Image (spheres, coloured by chain):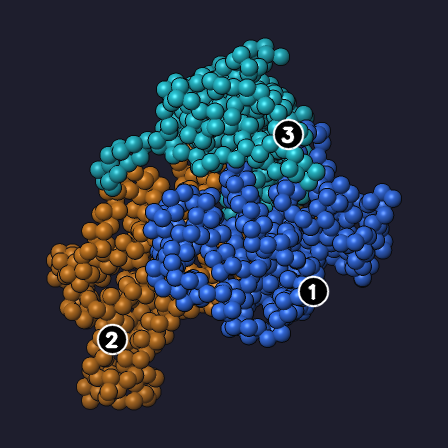
Chain colours: A orange, B blue, C cyan
Amino acid sequence: MSDTSILAAEVPAVGRPRSLAGDAWHDLRRSKVFWVALVLIVVILLMAAWPSLFTSADPRECVLSRQHKPAGGSAIFGYDFQGCDVYAKTVYGARYSIIVGVFATLIAGLIGAAFGLSAGFFGGWIDAVLSRFVDVMLGIPLLLGAIVLAKRLSSDPASNGVFAVTVTLGLLGWTTAARVMRSSVIAAKNQDYVAAARMLGAGNSRLLFRHILPNSMASFIVVLTILLGINIASEATLSFLGIGLKGDAISWGIAISEATGYVRVAAGPLIWPSLFLAATVLAFIMLGDAVRDAFDPKLR
Amino acid sequence: MTPVTDIKAQMDVLPGLDPRAPLLHVDDLRVEFRTRDGVAKAVNGATFYLNAGETLAILGESGCGKSVTAQAVMGILDSPPGHVTGGRVLYRGVDLLKLGEKDRRKVRANRIAMIFQDALSALNPVYTVGFQLAELFRKHRGMSRASSKLRSIELLDQVRIPAAKDRINDYPHQFSGGMRQRVMIAMALALDPEVLIADEPTTALDVTVQAQIMGLLAELQHQRNMGLILITHDMGVVADVADRISVMYAGKIVEEAPVYDIYARPAHPYTKALLESIPRLDHKGRQLNVIRGLPPSLTDIPSGCSFHPRCGYAREICRGDQPPPSYQIAPHRIASCHFIREVLGV
Amino acid sequence: MSDVSDLVLDARGLVKHFPITQGIVFRSKVGEVRAVDGVDLQLRRGETLGVVGESGCGKSTLAKLLVGLEKPTAGEIMVRGEDMTRLSGHALRRARRNIQMVMQDPYTSLNPRMTVGDIIGEPFAIHPDAVPRSGRERAVQELLDLVGLNPDHINRYPHQFSGGQRQRIGIARALALRPEIIVCDEPVSALDVSIQAQVINLLERLQRELGLSYVFIAHDLSVVRHISDRVAVMYLGKIVETGYHMAIYEQPTHPYTQALLSAVPVPDPRLRGHRDHIVLEGDVPSPANPPSGCRFRTRCWKAQPYCADHEPLLQIRQRAPHPSACHYAEVRDLLHRH
């Protein structure tokens, strides 16, 4: 009896050498959660890109006489306070919510990863300076910072404010991601396998990208998926306060904040965009979970 | 000092307690862990006994079930996922497994105590050592603040902590590894237990400190006529202190014998192979004998004799459905193997 | 035997002090831990030098210095006529190929997100000139075979292997660049008893087949005796006694060596009560503030006022046939029945 035959997992022997990414994709394809999340995200992205695929109604065609009328015809979600088609508004709202949410999260993720990686990997005075800077950033209240930043960024009265809101949220929201990344990097950096690679003569970039980063991504991905939801919701807050999207821009956030005042009269205009928002955030969280698990060989 | 009233009298009497019955008798103990990957049979019918003043070593590799056995005897098994599925743990004739949690806790504090490998995590880091010791006396003995403090100092003195009077105000992390182990021993012995279970008590320590701690344990055991169960993988430590040895493999006791016999003439192939595989300080051998393969996974224990895939003596009979019976070789000597004669060389 | 050309590693006057600092942005040094404080060691081709000592004696720091994971505060490490401590960049990377390490913990020393093939092949990826790209997979499989693992398992991940098998993977990785010297830092102490022998035998076989030289660092004196040709005993950053294994184990002269040997349990109950037991009082002093003169004097039963003022040198003495750092060195047999 060979002493390996009692191993729990039987991987097909030999064949082509495989990579972690290849194995992860192999796993992802078999994950139900991944497919559900992917389908949801694709639908939402389609909605953001070509809303006319989903509805022929114009979300800006509002008639006060239809105020809070129940569902009928193509307006399957009914009408809101202004007499706008809630379904059409929700479909059209996807675009800015997604743009703001995804890009603000990307900006925050990139800044956070850069800060966290350098602080954690280099340590010493670099870490001290960067970490204190993160502390200072954390001390800035989101609203106050956003008011100042968004005002500066959207000086052009013609813009709809999407760029300003996205950059504002990205610049203010990276601190948690940086902290999480820093602590994961510190934990990974002190592992023996990093020392082993260093001993073999590996350079910093190899240490960082082959050894430390893959082993610090798990909690970072989770933080990012949560941040995505927060960003979509924050856009709503900023828009509600008048420093977010401007003009006749449509977004879930604006729709939700408008509807909250009339929730006792008609709940539909509040519930539908909220449901879409929740489904979007959930889809990204599920995707994040599935990807994280696929990249963890221990779960294989 | 306030009078310490008769300690045993203060404790509620356990129903059925018979002072003349054997100190501890574990009979056919079975423990399972129900996990995602299936049922892990950690202990599969462990039987052993312990007399007052005696040291029994339970010897085995990691994953053989020795620590789980101790936890089941103590009643501190993580449950779920752990479940005792059979057997008896008789303390002076009382089956501990049938007791309610309240009685069990009483036994745990007063009659059977345990020390662990990692003293730092066994002590509470936010209280001083003195407070943790004194709390025991106040809670279980109803002693006053002042007298419990005095008793704590006395106890730390007994485990040879220098300047005990000053050190009771220190926190666990302020003690060195060896000193912490002493503190844990003091806590375990505070309520004068009759049985002490030591789970790898010196594994994390350096040899010179290990010698100090083992010496201390032996001395305290002698003074108190206490039964000591020493759970370890170290055949050297066992040879130095044990009276009897139970060798455990895949959740079973495969051999039980007095210490001199087992080292001179092991009766089970596993014991024999283990002895031949360890490097010796007292002579430089050539090649070490190797036990091939790995200990079995507890979710998938081989049929028949669980050692057969790694055993040089194994034949068809060992692979069958029935595990080998336990043969009585001599008084106090038991081994579970079909080929005892061949192993002993008679 | 002691031909100079046989010398594969020659370390002289190795010192490593770690500063103790306070403050976060503005750090100030408030002291230093003298982890390694003046160590000389020589290693010859095909030889195993055992280094024993208790935790905190500096043996692990010594290992890191030898493989270049830490830069020494002072001293030189000569490998093939080059001082490793003075090299940097490309030259250092090339020199490192010759001295590799097997680490203690097989569970943390392998990247969990890399396949075994990638782990053992990493040395080739870092040093592309070692093996041409097309031959790497073959080379990895040969290494797996060499350490007794199934060459078909290159696509498995570390967690699919047992502790002993992982240690073999670590050994294969260390062998990939065909080094002459391997520093083993407690290579078997994390393994089960029945697995330790497998790994020790493997290391011995590889030494015979490949002509390797080992620096074998461990706290287990029995394992060190089994595998070593020469032994050095460390205490608080210094070597206190060194010599051939027979000399150290049968005729120890330094009180610390004697105490260590007397404390090691021997798996033979017949020796119970027949061995000399030297019980040392107290704990090892902090390396941040070592005692003056002889560092062992605070726990030594032979200590005299002289020891506090005069540091004993590691040298052959009147009653010590091999180098011993004790003013009162004297042979005492501790392993046999009296």
Q: CA distance from mark 1 to mark 3?
A: 40 Å
Q: Nearer the viewer, residue C326 or A283?
A: C326
Residue A26, given in percent of the width and then of the height, sits at 55, 56
Residue B159, given in percent of the width and then of the height, sits at 47, 48
Q: CA distance from mark 1 to mark 2?
A: 71 Å
The answer to whether dots 1 and 3 both sit on one chain is no
Q: Amino acid at mark 2?
A: Ala
- SS class, disc 3: loop
Q: Quadrant of the C terminus of chain B?
A: top right
- SS class, disc 2: helix
Mark nearer the viewer, 1 or 2:
1
Q: Which mark is residue A255?
A: 2
Of all residues shown, which one is farthest toward the right? B346
Q: Which mark is residue B27?
A: 1
The residue under label 3 is C335
Q: Quadrant of residue B325?
A: bottom right
Mark 3 chain: C
Say left or right for A83 vs B154.
Answer: left
Label 3: how many residues lie within 10 Å, few (<14), some (14-19) or many (20+)?
A: many
Label 2: how many residues lie within 10 Å, few (<14), some (14-19) or many (20+)?
A: many
- Residue shown at the point (47%, 40%) measured from the top left: A192
Q: Amino acid at mark 1?
A: Asp
Q: Quadrant of residue C120?
A: top right
Q: Are marks 1 and 3 in contact (CB under 8 Å)?
A: no
- Residue shown at the point (49%, 52%) measured from the top left: B185
Mark 1 chain: B
